[in-house]
């Protein structure tokens, strides 16, 4: 099939790398010829409506890389071409307020929150939720962008200014034990598969390290996360990969946010799982049988390469390490690539991670 992707970043690139062995072709709606996926398929630059139409006509099925995609575009495409995940998935997940309302409706726990559209709203929200709290724009945030951690009442004005007047949401700060995420894939026929829970470490709002599967996860914790996932997939009639970011507390598991797409915390699946998240997303949207999601090795790690390439040759010298570079230029806080390590020994995994410690803050 001809698979069209709205966007042409690293996620599109890795989707393409998994689609070719299955005999598919790729089309990208890109911002420029230099985008990370643009050489991996036919690229249409979205600077005029005519080219955008050609891209639609040239695709049998369309998917997207980011939840910050215009729902109107999806409505337009939907008239002529199949789009997965569908409009509902995008509408809920691109707006933090709608996402939280859906969680409430499904009785899935999340941090206390209040929507905020003015400084006085913010003050009222703080008196109800308390401090510390995080103010986030309801839309367009990623990698910790559009967020302000408010620790003292003295920061209220500064926090509201940082939102530049955008509609925002105040969330109570969660003192979590650790951050986990769950990735699942659902087919057009409703068939679904879950990956194991993984543990994520962030620095300044950006993912730096994933350990997969997460260690010390009880069967009941995995099942609880899967039950949240099942409710969300069904409620949105989702097709493709869905990711849930979670906070684990002593005896509670709460949802941070959800993403209607392949996720950075699932990059380890390229070498670490029987079927990668990218391949399973392609299988789902092309109505093919889903692949097995279990881990091939007991211990896997994914380390992000952020801002600077550093000594990437070190990764090439480590047995069981795999280097992925996205063909991007260096820039502060930009994701340039990642390294996966797979192992059946915890000591070996830890020593490989240690050799790559220049990538970990
Ligand atoms: N309510 C919260 N309490 C504590 N930490 C939080 C909260 N919200 C976000 N964070 C931290 O900031 C990171 C990024 O926030 P998130 O809402 O996931 O935004 P993004 O869309 O940028 O990933 C989270 O992974 C977590 O480490
Ligand atoms: Mg997040």
Image: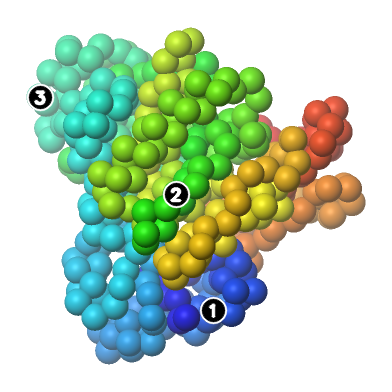
Q: Categorize mark 3 by other alpha carbons within 10 Å: few (<14), some (14-19), many (20+).
A: few
The local secondary structure at tag 3 comes to helix
The local secondary structure at tag 2 comes to strand
Nearer the observer: mark 1 or 2; the answer is 2
Judged left or right of residue 110, residue 42 is right
Q: Badge 3 is on which residue? A: 120
- Residue 113, position in %: x, y? 23, 24
* Cα–Cα span, label 1 and label 2: 22 Å
* Cα–Cα span, label 3 and label 2: 45 Å
Look at the picture and state if 175 lies above or below 179.
above
Q: Categorize mark 1 by other alpha carbons within 10 Å: few (<14), some (14-19), many (20+).
A: some
Q: What residue is at 80 percent from the left and 29 percent from the top?
A: 346
Q: Earlier in the sequence, mark 1 or mark 3?
A: 1
Q: Badge 2 is on which residue? A: 192
As rendered, which of 108 and 168 lies closer to the eye?
A: 108
Look at the picture and state if 236 lies above or below 61.
above
Nearer the observer: mark 1 or 3; the answer is 1
Is the C-beta separation of discs 1 and 3 under 8 Å?
Answer: no
As rendered, which of 309 and 240 lies closer to the eye?
A: 240
Q: Badge 1 is on which residue? A: 24
Q: What residue is at 33 percent from the left and 53 percent from the top?
A: 238
Q: Categorize mark 2 by other alpha carbons within 10 Å: few (<14), some (14-19), many (20+).
A: some
Residue 104 visible, this angle: yes
Q: Earlier in the sequence, mark 3 or mark 2?
A: 3
The local secondary structure at tag 1 comes to loop
Judged left or right of residue 8, residue 153 is left
Image disc number at residue 56: none
Q: What residue is at 44 percent from the left and 30 percent from the top?
A: 225
In the figure, residue 231 lies in which quadrant? top left
Coloration of the structure image: rainbow
Nearer the observer: mark 3 or 2; the answer is 2
Q: Earlier in the sequence, mark 1 or mark 2?
A: 1
């Amino acid at each position: 099939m001809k698979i069209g992707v709205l966007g042409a970043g690293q996620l599109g690139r890795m989707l393409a790398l998994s689609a070719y062995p299955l005999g598919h072709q790729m089309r990208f709606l890109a911002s420029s010829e230099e985008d990370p996926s643009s050489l991996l398929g036919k690229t249409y630059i979205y600077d005029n409506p005519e080219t955008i139409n050609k891209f639609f006509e040239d695709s049998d099925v369309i998917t997207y890389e980011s939840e910050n995609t215009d729902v109107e575009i999806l409505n337009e495409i939907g008239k002529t071409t199949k789009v997965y995940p569908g409009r509902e998935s995008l509408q809920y997940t691109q707006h933090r307020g709608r996402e939280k309302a859906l969680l409430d409706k499904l009785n899935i726990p999340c941090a206390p929150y209040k929507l905020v559209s003015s400084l006085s709203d913010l003050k009222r929200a703080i008196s109800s939720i308390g401090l510390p709290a995080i103010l986030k724009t309801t839309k367009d945030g990623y990698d910790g962008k559009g967020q302000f951690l408010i620790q003292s009442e003295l920061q209220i004005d500064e926090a509201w200014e940082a939102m530049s007047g955008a509609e925002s949401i105040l969330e109570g700060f969660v003192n979590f034990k650790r951050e986990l995420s769950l990735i699942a894939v659902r087919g057009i026929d409703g068939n679904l598969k879950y990956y194991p829970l993984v543990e994520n470490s962030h620095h300044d709002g950006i993912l730096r390290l994933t350990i997969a599967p997460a260690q010390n996860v009880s069967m009941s914790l995995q099942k609880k996360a899967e039950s949240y996932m099942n409710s969300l997939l069904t409620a949105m009639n989702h097709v493709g990969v869905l990711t849930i970011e979670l906070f684990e507390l002593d005896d509670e598991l709460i949802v941070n946010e959800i993403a209607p797409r392949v996720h950075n915390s699932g990059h380890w699946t390229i070498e670490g799982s029987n079927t990668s998240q990218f391949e399973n997303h392609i299988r789902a949207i092309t109505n093919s049988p889903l692949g097995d999601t279990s881990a091939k090795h007991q211990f896997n790690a994914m380390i992000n390469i952020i801002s600077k390439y550093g000594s990437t040759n070190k990764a090439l010298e480590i047995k069981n390490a795999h280097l992925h570079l996205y063909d991007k230029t260096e820039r502060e806080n930009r994701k340039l690539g990642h390294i996966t390590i797979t192992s059946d020994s915890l000591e070996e995994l830890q020593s490989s991670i240690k050799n790559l410690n220049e990538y970990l803050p």
